[in-house]
Amino acid sequence: MSGQPSLGLEVHQNKFLADGDRAMTAIVRVVSRGGEAAVTRTAAEVLMIDCSSSMRFPSTKIGEARRAAAAAIEVLPDGVRFAVIQGTEHATLIYPAEDGLVAASERTRAEARAAVEHLAAVGGTAMGAWLAKARDLFEHEPDAVRHAILLTDGRNDSQTRAALMSVLNSCEGRFVCDARGIGDGWEPAELTQIGRVLRGNVDSVVEDDELAEDFRRLVESAMTKVLPEVRLRIGTMPFSRLRSVKQVFPDEYDLTDRCQEVAARELELSLGSFAGDEARDYQLILDLDPDLEPSHGQDRQLAWTELVPVPGAAAEEGALPIAGRWTRDPVPPTLIHPMVSKYAAQADLGEALTAGGDAYAAGDQAGAERHWGRAVTLATAAGDQETLSRLSGVVEIVDAEKGVVRLRSDATRSHALHVVIPSRVSEIALPQEDRPMPEAAPVACAGCPALSPAGANFCVGCGRPFGEAVS
């Protein structure tokens, strides 16, 4: 196996459209392969531990936070650059003593574990300050795979939401941050925003003593990353517009507003860091010009997508088209691609979970049971044991097929938060086979001056299928 990772793209869609259709949905899969064997890229890790006053109650909370930080430090491989931040209304570097990151070794890991034993819960909560400090620390490691963990039990009450968003915007693309909520006082919208902008995983820990193992897993996963940042480029045609782009696997985030315009009808989206063997799926929805004349009997390129070249990674292919073909046969346009269908069902499940959480928070027991009952039915049909396990903390299942449930008398807000947090790990993505790299020259179009990648079926300039006569 080559030590150099490779990156590939796949497009999954039903290309057939009825005459009146003016929207197209496609799933774009980004796959990395083969980089785990011999890549020697450096890694950097920053732990941000909430030490606000609320972490004192119950008394086990700050103790488990110390134990979790120590567990994360313990699994850092030698040479990884790291630091630990004590988070209150300020960001205080508790290890190392001097500003910057330090290389992990037997000595520094022992020193850091000793330092986190002195974490004290006194102060407010300003997550933006913690993230800004992490950003500044990572600036000293520009070539490293940069990862952070943020733990909190409360709301960002020492800082405005606008200030937090401003910091997040300045951190985007600079590092990936996984966020964890503990207890029942944290705000899902705030952690979800952190995970969405910084392309991390967001979840909650119901039992305090589960935190250390969770931190250990997060660090071990982060250490498998070999590419600091992968970027996806999306191009549209004069008659098409990108309505939305959403990551749907492994975590679910709407990323439409995170796209950056880099050229006319071209957008780029940071996907975060990738491991040597990893796949992620993104749902793209395109809107087409209402006046666009349908092209029957042949494919028309509606958009295209490609990966921006990544130093140290080979590209398996160039741009791939998102195509459309109009037909008067009433059947093909009604067929939903299996991947599109699965992610639509996943979205329905997420809506049911969230609606149940909203009803629960409003004290509407009947509403919570109705929505969570529907979620039980959907999760059962999908074989989603992870979601069913989470739901078991808030409801007793009477009839899964009919969606009849009873709210548990011992359910707490912490259990409810564990259900509604949106970035649930999905089991939908499937392993893909390796594909050879193309070596042919770019393709010239007969109808315009644009050059298209080798193997392209359509011109990236005008969308004309190659081989079509020029009138």
Image: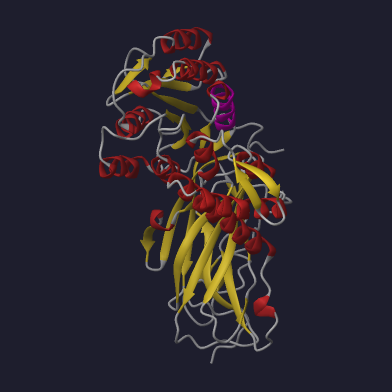
Whether 390 is drawn above or below 457: the answer is above
Identify which residue is drawn at 72% across, 49% down.
383
**Quadrant location, the N terminus:** top right
Stretch in magenta: 211-223
The image position of residue 11, as x and y in percent, is 62, 62
Residue 68 appears anywhere in the view: yes
53 horizontally vs 64: left or right:
left
Q: Is residue 128 above or below residue 388?
A: above
Q: Residue furthest bottom?
A: 471
Instruction: Give the colouring mode of the picture.
Output: secondary structure
Q: Main secondary structure of the magenta part?
A: helix
- In the rendered view, tell whether residue 336 sits above or below residue 378: below
Q: Residue at x 50, y 28 (%)?
A: 43
Residue 12 appears at what percent x and percent y?
A: 64, 64
Magenta span contains residue 218? yes
Observer-nearest residue: 402 or 274? 402
Image position, residue 296 (x, y; %): 62, 88
Q: Quadrant of residue 114?
A: top left
Of residues 325 and 398, the one nearer the viewer is 398
**Magenta span has 269?**
no
Q: Position of residue 299 (x, y in %)?
A: 62, 79
Query: On the rendered structure, is 450 left or right of 77?
Result: left
Asked whether 85 or 381 is in front, the reply is 381
Q: Is residue 185 above or below residue 426?
A: above
Q: Residue at x 57, y 36 (%)?
A: 409
Left or right, 376 with reference to 194? right
- Camera-nearest residue between 166 and 38: 166
